[in-house]
Image (tube, rainbow, N blue to C red):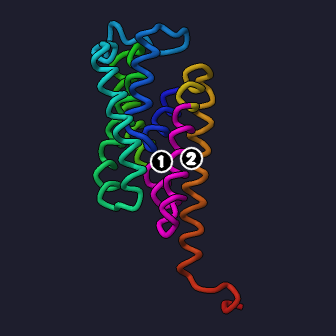
Amino acid sequence: MGAGLAVLTGLRAFLPLAFVALYSRLEFASSPHLTDTPFAFLENWWVIGLLLGLAVIEMAADKILSRSVIFARATQPVKIIFGGVVFAAAMAPEGWVAMLVTGILGLLIAGLADHVWRRMRPASAEKAALVLISLYVDIIVLVGTLLFVLVPLIGALLTCFLVLVFYRVRVVSRRKHRGLRILRD
């Protein structure tokens, strides 16, 4: 579950953590129980409201500033940090060692997801198309967050898929810069 949420945090920084905090507060059966952990403050209603408000602002800003490289660069460290936080929060009931290891792993996964998303997002598309893509990402993050809490194994499968996509993007990028394959023969 934590790995999948870290992937989603690489797409939208605040929404997965807000929903993990909300699910923990509402005591979903498969959600992490943050009550006696260092992440217990996330269960406060004002923190959940703040995270949801920041998520709405991020979603609106992504649609308004869809072509802004500065916005993408400014949100990148936030996404990476929150990826580590959400993975560590998901594993918080397991103890300090698990939180530390998964927090570092969450940083890497969210950074990888953000990198793949920035490489695959079309830069030269029309503004309307970019807004539509941003809307699809919002829906994916909303549905994915609910799905990963209800069926935690799917998050691990998404992480494996992300690694595969990252590998394919690197291979295609290398091929693109090597020149035409027709001229090599």
Magenta-colored span = 114-142
Looking at the image, residue 167 sits to the left or right of residue 123; the answer is: right
**Callout 1: SS:** helix
For label 1, the residue is 113
135 magenta-colored: yes
Q: Main secondary structure of the magenta part?
A: helix
- How busy is the neighbourhood of tag 1: few (under 14 within 10 Å), some, or many (20 plus)? many
**Callout 2: SS:** helix
Depth check, front residue: 95 or 107: 107
In the rendered image, residue 46, in percent from the top left (x then y), is placed at 27, 17
Q: Residue at the spot x=48%, y=28% of the render? A: 2
Using the image, determine if residue 174 lies above or below residue 29: below
Q: Residue at the spot x=32%, y=34% of the render? A: 54
Q: Residue at the spot x=60%, y=42% of the render? A: 160
In the rendered image, residue 125, in percent from the top left (x then y), is placed at 52, 66
In the rendered image, residue 23, in percent from the top left (x then y), is placed at 46, 15
Q: Amino acid at mark 1?
A: Ala
The quadrant holding residue 88 is top left
Using the image, determine if residue 43 lies above or below residue 10: above
In the rendered image, residue 180, in percent from the top left (x then y), is placed at 63, 86
For label 2, the residue is 162
The answer to whether the residue labelled 2 contacts the one labelled 1, judged by CB atoms less than 8 Å apart, is yes
- How busy is the neighbourhood of tag 2: few (under 14 within 10 Å), some, or many (20 plus)? some
